[in-house]
Amino acid sequence: QVQLVQSGAEMKRPGASVRISCKASGYPFISHAIHWVRQAPGQRLEWMGWINVGNGNTRYSQKLQDRVTITRDTSASMGYMDLRSLRSEDTAVYYCARVIGFGGLDYWGQGTLVTVSS
Amino acid sequence: QSALTQPPSVSGSPGQSVTISCTGTSSDVGGYDRVSWYQQPPDTAPKLIIYEVTNRPSGVPDRFSGSKSGNTASLTISGLQADDEADYYCSSYTSSIGWVFGEGTKLTVL
C-alpha cells in the first residue's frame, strides 16, 4: 500500500536549519510529484512548495522561496525539505504529500512537528 | 498570496446537507479546474475528498460532491453524519505562485 513516512519531531533554535525527510513506498516514486505543506498550531494549511520527482524541477511559495529547498533522491524513494534561518513562527507540523491528477494530494505523511524556540 | 476565502464555520443536523464555499479569483479558482477539498479531523493529517473540482478519490462516499461557478468552488456534503465533523480546506492552483489553500471551515454536526 502507498505510504509516506516522515522523519521525527525536531526542536531547533532560532536561526538554525532543519531537514525533514519523506520516505515513499508502495508506488513508482517518480510517477507522482511531492508537495510540502505546513500547519502552525491552530492555523490553516499553508502550501510550501513542490517537486517534480521525475525531473527535479521545483516551485516554492513566494513567502518561503528564500529559505526553503525541496529535493529528492530517486534511488532511495526519498523526498527532503530544508528550511533555513528558522524563526518562532516556523513552529508547525510539516507534511509531505503525493499528487494525483492536477494537484489533488491523495496520500500524506504522518506529519513532523518542528518547534523553534530559544 | 492571500488564502482562498471560506466561511469560518458551518453546521447541520444529521441527515441534512451543507455546502461550504471557497472563493478566489480568476487567477486561481476561476481560471483552472484544479480545485481540491480536504477533510481534517483534529490532530490528523488532511484527507483528500475532492480533486479537479468534481472528482472523488476511490473510497470517498458519493455524499461528498464538488462544483464550481466562476471564481467560487463549493463542497456539498449530503446525508450528514457525526463523523463528518472536521475542518475542511479547499485548495487551488494559482498562476502566480503555484498553489494556495483556503482559510478552512469548521463543520459542526448538531
Image (cartoon, grey):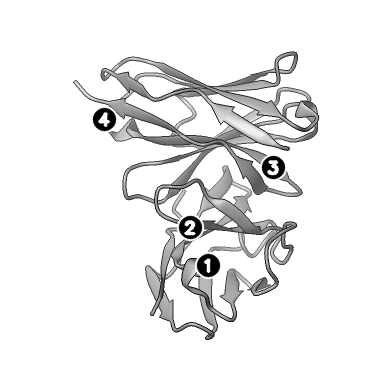
For mark 1, what is the residue?
Answer: B22
Q: Are marks 1 and 3 in contact (CB under 8 Å)?
A: no
Instruction: Tell me if mark 2 has few (under 14), some (14-19) or many (20+) residues whose alpha carbon lies within 10 angstroms of its own.
Output: many
In the figure, is residue B97 to the left or right of A74? left
Image quadrant where residue A11 sits? top left
Q: Are marks 2 and 3 in contact (CB under 8 Å)?
A: no
The local secondary structure at tag 1 comes to strand
Give the Cα separation between the discs numbered 4 and 2.
23 Å
In the figure, is residue A3 to the left or right of A48? right
User: Residue flagged by tag 1: what amino acid is it?
Assistant: Cys
User: Residue flagged by tag 3: what amino acid is it?
Assistant: Val
Closer to the observer: label 3 or label 4?
A: 3
**How many marks are shown on the rendered structure?**
4
Instruction: Reply above or below: A29 against B33.
Output: above
Q: Are marks 1 and 2 in contact (CB under 8 Å)?
A: yes
User: Where does the image place residue A36, in percent across and percent down from the top left?
Assistant: 55, 35
Q: Chain of mark 2?
A: B
User: Residue flagged by tag 2: what amino acid is it?
Assistant: Gly
Instruction: Say which mark, if any, is on residue A88.
Output: 4
> Which residue appears at 57% of the width and 52% of the height?
B47
Give the Cα separation between the discs numbered 2 and 3.
18 Å
Instruction: Tell me if mark 1 has few (under 14), some (14-19) or many (20+) residues whose alpha carbon lies within 10 angstroms of its own.
Output: many
Q: Are marks 4 and 2 in contact (CB under 8 Å)?
A: no
Q: Earlier in the sequence, mark 1 or mark 2?
A: 1
Taking depth in this image into account, of A27 and A84 the one nearest to the observer is A27
For mark 2, what is the residue?
Answer: B102
The local secondary structure at tag 3 comes to strand
Instruction: Say which mark, if any, is on residue A99.
Output: 3
> Which residue appears at 40% of the width and 48% of the height?
B43
